[in-house]
Amino acid sequence: MRLLLLFFCFLFSFPIFAKDNVQFYLEKYGRANPQNAYVQQAEIVFKRIVAVADRKHHRYPQLAIINSPADPWAIALPDGYIVIASKTLEICYKNVSKEVGDTRVAFILGHELAHLANDDFWHQEVAQFSHQNQALSQALQHRPQQKELAADDRGFIYAAIAGYPVDKLLTQDFFQHWQQQTTTQIHSETHPDPQIRQQMLQARLKNILDKLPLFHFGVRLSHFERCEDAVYFLREFQKIFPAREVLNNLGFCYLQLARQDLGQAAYYYWMPLLLDTHSQADTLDLAPRSAVRSDLPSRRADKWLLQAKDYLELAVKTDKYYVPAHLNLAVTLLYLKEIYHARAVIEKARKLEPDNLMIQGLRALILYEEGLETDMWSQAIQLLQKLIADENVPTSLIYNAARLLDIRGRSGSDALWQRLAQQHETLPPAIRMIVCEKTDCPRPTTAPSTIKQWQPPIEVGTYIRRNKTAKQVLKKWRSLPFDWQLELYGTVYQAPQQGYELLEIAGYLEMAVFNQVSDLNPLILQDYCAAPLQKRQIAQGELYFCQNWAALVLNQHVKQVWLVKN
């Protein structure tokens, strides 16, 4: 009689220990009751984990929950099935919150999906951050234990990417709980000690959190249109945490690069892009007929757009309910002239958020572009005119309605251009230039005599490697150096107690972040700007910005201020 396995890997075994066909288990135990609440919830969790998990061997994973009171607790089979016992679900959910139960099941299923993927390079990556733990390093020398630790690690990451609070696996003594519930014994040759598993996942979690600043600085650089630098930060974080928001922001960056390369042609329409500032690791005048050109002015723009498409499609695949990626993908497809594909994507987004005005406005443009052969102009302009009747409508919709009216030479566009001109100082520079070409813009507002200044501990732009004062300040700060093949190198500095983060690239201080600004009212941000504040919609809030700074505002509260060189 084979030994039972410890913790999740007591749960997890390989086909050599049992029959390798799902029919064997279904015939022997039968399916669990599909009406059972635990079974229904496990099916939901499985769909979320499958969406983010690696897939190999051309096998689409499927789940079979069997009516087994004990072993096999969970097993991955060569035919692509994950078999899990109803008793396993009971152990996971009993006497804990639904959130904790879901997280446990997500980890178990992720572990088994990792066995299917069979990532043989995992131990090399983990060795980079586990070398200081002697017991863990020894466990990594044993190939069978490598496989189990690898599956633990991947399952942990899959669950985290899917949005489950995996840190709670480590704060609760589930290892001991599982052993007691299953009366499992330890097989030291094939499965590491439970304490090693705990240390492994703690090391992985620390690695993710240590690298999290790379994601946030990638986002900040993206906002300041420094995407050439931002992609390095985002790609580095993607290596350890390829979550939907990371993929979306990479797509956002490549789309920004394409728009920069396209120049004014990119702004024939004003198409919204959504940047996501939040990671789950935390607790955008050619031919009058169409803005979508049949030929691109440069190969670079084409390359950026195709890369944006790849990342955004992957983000949508990772989470089919994630609206920012749908919106950005629809914009990218519109630029690529893949109109019917863009229509399909925007319709999915509309189902997810039917009241989202940006989605409705973009849908109107896609309808027009899609109907160039059958003339959908009337339907598109009717949609936009209905939307812009609201005074609080996004200005991008007003701009696009004016564009469509101009295409047909219809009356009414002049009033819309003038409506935009009244707020021209808050428009993005490229859009402002077009608006002021269309109609006379009011003279710029006179700047106040005194403007408040942000005061970072070290002035942005300082070459800190030769500055003794800066070196002294940073000496006790937490540091995260990066060096990506000499193309981009520097250090992220953090002083959590003082609420500062600094980004140094090639010796120069490029950005300062203020985190302790919760007492700052969004209404007084204008005091720090000589011109009217601009505002950008982001995935979970807004960015107020002016020249060389931006304030992250969530639920009407300022959370951070980002400062770059003026």
Image (spheres, helix red, strand yellow):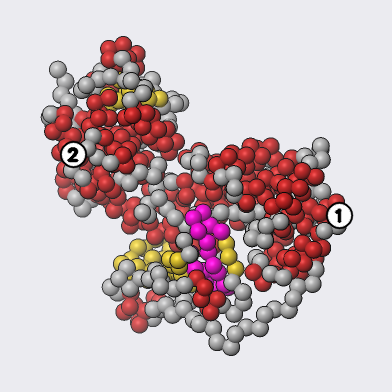
Other residues around mark 1 within 10 Å, as few (<14) / some (14–19) / many (≥20): few
- Above-or-below relation of 526 to 4: below
Residue pointed to by mark 1: 410
Q: Tell me if 193 is positioned left or right of 530 in this view.
A: left
Q: Which residues are magenta?
A: 537-553
State the SS at label 2.
helix
Instruction: In the rendered structure, find residue 491 and report the number of the disc placed on it.
Output: none
User: How would you classify the magenta stretch by its main secondary structure?
Assistant: strand
Residue found at the very far front of the displayed protein: 390
Q: Based on the picture, tell me whether residue 521 belongs to the magenta stretch.
A: no
Figure quadrant of the N terminus: top left
The location of residue 464, given as percent across then percent down, is: 40, 76
Left or right of 423 in this view: 84: left
Whether residue 62 is visible to the viewer of this picture, yes or no, is yes
The answer to whether residue 291 is left or right of residue 326 is right
**Disc 1 and disc 2: Cα gap in Å?**
71 Å
Could you tell me if residue 118 is visible in this image?
Answer: no
Three-letter residue code for mark 2 = Phe
Q: Secondary structure at mark 1?
A: loop
Q: Which of these two is toward me, 168 or 250?
A: 168
Q: Position of residue 264 (x, y in %)?
A: 72, 60
Q: Is residue 180 above or below residue 232?
A: above
Please tell me whether mark 1 or mark 2 is closer to you in this view: 1
Q: Residue furthest bottom?
A: 449
In terms of image quadrants, where is residue 119? top left
Q: Mark 1 or mark 2: which comes first in sequence?
A: 2
Counting from the top left corner in percent of width and height, residue 553 is at 48, 64
- Amino acid type, residue under disc 1 in the picture: Arg
Q: Position of residue 145 (x, y in %)?
A: 22, 35
